[in-house]
Amino acid sequence: MSRLEENVLWGPDRDGVSLLVGDGLVAGFGHGVASEKATTRVECSGARVLPGRLNAHTHIYSGLAPLGMPSPAEPPENFVHILERVWWRLDRALDEETLRASARFYVAEALLAGTTALIDHHESPNYIEGSLDILADACDELGIRAVLTFGATERNGGREEARRGLAECRRFIDSNRRPLVKGVVGLHASFTVSDETIREAGDLCRELGTVLHVHMAEDGADVLDAQDRGYPGPLERLIELDALPPGSIMAHGVHLAADQVRRAADTGVWLVQNPRSNRGNEVGYPPALAVSDRVALGTDGYPARMSDEAAVLRQEAAAHGEPEAVVEGRIEAGYRLLAELFGIAFSPLAAGAAADVVAETDGAVELVMVGGRTVVDGGTLLSADMSEIRTHAESQAERLWQRLADLG
């Protein structure tokens, strides 16, 4: 039995199974349980009950992309072209209203899929100041746990753009009071920033007592850029510039070697594998991640249906000779990552763990609770009107596609 399976209770033949919740935490879980600390009892008989799922790296700003995002006029020929002709154009087209629609639609669908926590990496270079509050408000309204950052970059406006991105991280971290939402410092990727910006990001992490979230070696272009700047690679660049406090999060790591992954683990840094994105962008598979137990699972902007992400990881792992246990390892590691960020346990479902819970029947999500708040019941979103969210998303998607076209 895997560690993940130990955290799952099957209920069809177990009458009387209850989940007790108090102050946002599990107060008891099992048969005939009772607790003076409990304020809510949820009957779970006949359901599969498990900890809520984590998407350890995503881009909420891409939430409208499935609603008819047009293909680029010139087909991309490599990974950098994909960024330049697709995603960097999309993030430049975002304004307040399209970002709000993206966030509410992405978060709502995540909850309906049983995902209770998102670690997001945001970019909207033409709408920086206040953008993290738009994301945070959507997360708070709908009831999802989230870790947010702005990915500072110099790719559009040079050093001033990077300073504004880091300032948005600072502003949000200082001002945010939402109990289920946290802020960290972000950089887009090392190949889009100078050494000065990387140093400033590290300084800001230490000043605010937080960590860095950054893309790392997703493609060989990131490695070549670091080498052109005189570093062995992007990991070594960030370490030498003192920008990776323990607990920092690096997305991808596809082009890291095993010794680099070990160094990251020894530094206390997390990596996040994103199988659907890596396969779609044809950047490769990261077998070196197997040497670290600090590797979680993310979607890199794909919808936060983590069962789909796990299925692709199973396929990719099998194709590259890795055992299926790698999937459970990534999922279980995600709970440890969340525990580091929030200071509470998320798995297993036992007294004192966060009451972030999913109940499923025949594979369908029936109930979702986050921090003790029931946000999905009977497969229906309770925290907002899903039909209104979708209608607004569809109308704003049309605006966004027009703004994309206006970029030329």
Image (cartoon, rainbow, N blue to C red):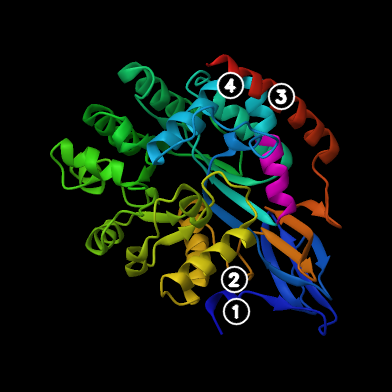
| Residue 29 x/y as whole percent | 71, 73
Marked residue nearer the N-terminal end (2 or 1): 1
Mark 3 or mark 2: whose residue is earlier in sequence: 2
Three-letter code, disc 4 = Leu
Circles 2 and 4 in contact, beta carbons < 8 Å: no
Q: Secondary structure at mark 3?
A: helix
- CA–CA distance in space, label 2 to label 4: 45 Å
Q: Main secondary structure of the magenta part?
A: helix
What is the C-alpha distance between the residues marked 2 and 1? 8 Å
Q: Which residue is mark 1?
A: 6
From this viewpoint, is residue 37 visible?
Answer: no
Front disc: 3 or 1: 3
Mark 2 residue element? loop
Amino acid beneath label 2? Pro
Which residue is labeled 3 in the image? 398
- Identify which amino acid the numbered label 3 is placed on: Glu
Q: Indicate yes or no whether the magenta region holds residue 401.
A: no
Say which label, 2 or 4, has the lower sequence index.
Answer: 2
Residue topped by disc 4:
404
- Please tell me how crowded label 4 is: few (under 14), some (14-19), or many (20+) other residues with Cα within 10 Å: many
Task: Give residue 210's position: percent from left, percent from top.
Answer: 39, 42
Tell me the element at label 4: helix
**Disc 4 from disc 3: Cα separation:** 10 Å
Instruction: Tell me the number on the disc at residue 348.
Output: 2
Q: Which numbered mark, 1 or 4, is in the foreground of this view?
A: 4
